[in-house]
Image: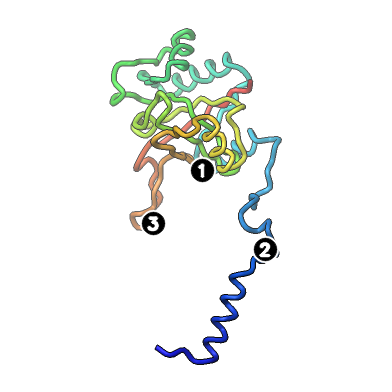
Amino acid sequence: MKISPAKENILKRVRNALSQSVQLPFPNSEGNSSVFKTENEGLELKFAEEFTRLQGKFVFCTSKAELMDNLRLLCENKDWHNIYCQTPALLKMLHREELPALNQGNMHEADAAITDCEYLVARTGTVVLSAAQPSGRALPVYTPVHIMIAYTHQLVFDLKDAFNKLKDKYGQHLPSAISFATGPSRTADIEKTLVVGIHGPKEVYVFLVDE
């Protein structure tokens, strides 16, 4: 196929331009920095605002004693008799404090599940979970109510910060599954009608303990 002189001239100019490196006119616009303003203070408030906006239930606790008081009150108000947990550190605390509804009998009959989490993302109100946690993959999505216990050092501003911390924590051995829970499970696939709890828990609680 014969190339016209005009087209050959254009191609020649393109080849010459590609052979010479040109400094980017706006280097900071190439994804090197976040488009969101990072907030180092008030992450607890930011997370609470975003999490509750998406129908999540947030409880701030100033101590572990207050955490247990709030858990007992919640179990009493909800009339729960079967709370399932398989995270050793949490189980030790719950047994020591004698949470009345704690029952390790059958996960499939549990009223609610208590787990830990990896991180809390303040900007989006998202909870980061992974398969490396003792709770595994099934427990956070199987029971009708999911209760997560987190600590203030687990708060990060953005998803990028959470990924960086996961890389620092696990190195080259990242968990086989990393999931992001932003409020209760919901879908609007059927006639654009919002249905809560269709693919996971209907209620999601985060108890944040101030250290």
**Mark nearer the N terminus (3 vs 1):** 1
Q: Residue at x 55, y 19 (%)?
A: 67
Above or below, comparing residue 21 to residue 166 in the picture: below
Instruction: Using the image as rendered, state which of residue 28 and residue 172 is in the foreground.
Output: 172
Measure the C-alpha gap from mark 3 to mark 1: 17 Å
Res 144 quadrant in image: top left
Instruction: Tell me where residue 173 appears, x and y as whole percent.
Output: 44, 32
Helix, strand or loop at label 1? It is: loop
Please give the residue where the numbered disc 1 appears in the rendered image: 54
Q: Nearer the viewer, mark 1 or mark 2?
A: 2
Please give the residue where the numbered disc 3 appears in the rendered image: 192
Instruction: Tell me where residue 76 appears, x and y as whole percent.
Output: 45, 19
**Circles 3 and 2 in contact, beta carbons < 8 Å:** no
**Amino acid at the residue labelled 1:** Leu
**Circles 3 and 1 in contact, beta carbons < 8 Å:** no
Instruction: Tell me where residue 157 appears, x and y as whole percent.
Output: 62, 39
Q: Residue at x 65, y 58 (%)?
A: 29
Please give the residue where the numbered disc 2 appears in the rendered image: 24
